[in-house]
Image (tube, helix red, strand yellow):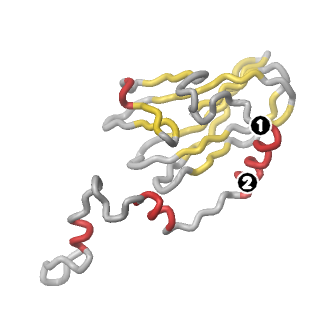
Amino acid sequence: MFDEHGRALPGWDAIRDFDPKNPPIKELDKYIESLYEYEETPEVEDFMKLLMIHGNLISNPEFKDRFNNWQIETSLEKGQYTLGKDGVFISSDANFDYSISQTVDIEYTGEYIAAVDYRGTNTTGVDVELFMDVEDESGVHTYTSDVFPDDIRFVTHLLKPVRLQKECQGDSRA
């Protein structure tokens, strides 16, 4: 910002001289996150309680065993998607397709919820969706939910509960 004489206003030097490789605050992401109040929605809190009680049907959900049990379909080169400490990291300067999924056999009739923790930076114009494809005797049914990336923290995105019958297959993708 400039004053009426074209001189930089105080504070401009801090922005102009900022070096992202050597930030003045070492844990910059944590600092920025601390500036924002954030509470989980009641739906996410309820989901987390159900997850604790019933367990996760997804195998290797935190990628501790790399991409084991995950199917990946992408237009990206191998080096453009990697595993970091917080999950899958994708970097591209161009448009791309990326889908990561896992098939689950449904053992009990009931309501099922798909969820993903997602964070994205520089995602203006990026289209992200959470999918659940369900295959039963009448065919494949697809349920979707838009994911709106937050660049400050990971946010849990939920698919509305879907009633599934025993012995059908669910395929969750993000």
User: Percent x, y for residue 173?
Assistant: 60, 30
Q: Residue at x 38, y 49 (%)?
A: 122
Q: Is 90 situated above or below 36?
A: above
Q: Amino acid at mark 1?
A: Gly
User: Percent x, y for residue 28?
Assistant: 40, 60
Q: Residues within 10 Å of mark 1 (few under 14, many from 20)?
A: few
156 with respect to 86 (left or right): right
Q: Residue at x 71, y 25 (%)?
A: 170
Badge number at residue 55: 1
Q: Are marks 2 and 1 in contact (CB under 8 Å)?
A: no
Please state which of residues 126 and 77 is positioned toward the viewer in this rendering.
77
In the image, farthest residue toward the front: 26
User: Taking the image as drawn, is residue 124 in sight?
Assistant: no
Please state which of residues 125 and 28 is positioned toward the viewer in this rendering.
28
Q: Residue at x 22, y 79 (%)?
A: 9
Image-quadrant location for residue 126: top left
Q: Quadrant of the C terminus?
A: top right
Q: Residue at x 42, y 47 (%)?
A: 123
Which residue is tagged 2? 45
Mark-to-mark CA distance, 2 and 1? 15 Å
Please state which of residues 19 and 99 is positioned toward the viewer in this rendering.
19
Q: Residues within 10 Å of mark 2 (few under 14, many from 20)?
A: few
User: Percent x, y for residue 152?
Assistant: 48, 56
Image-quadrant location for residue 92: top left
Please state which of residues 118 and 18 is positioned toward the viewer in this rendering.
18
Q: Is 139 situated above or below 8?
A: above
Q: Amino acid at mark 2?
A: Glu
Q: Quadrant of the N terminus?
A: bottom left
Q: Secondary structure at mark 2?
A: helix
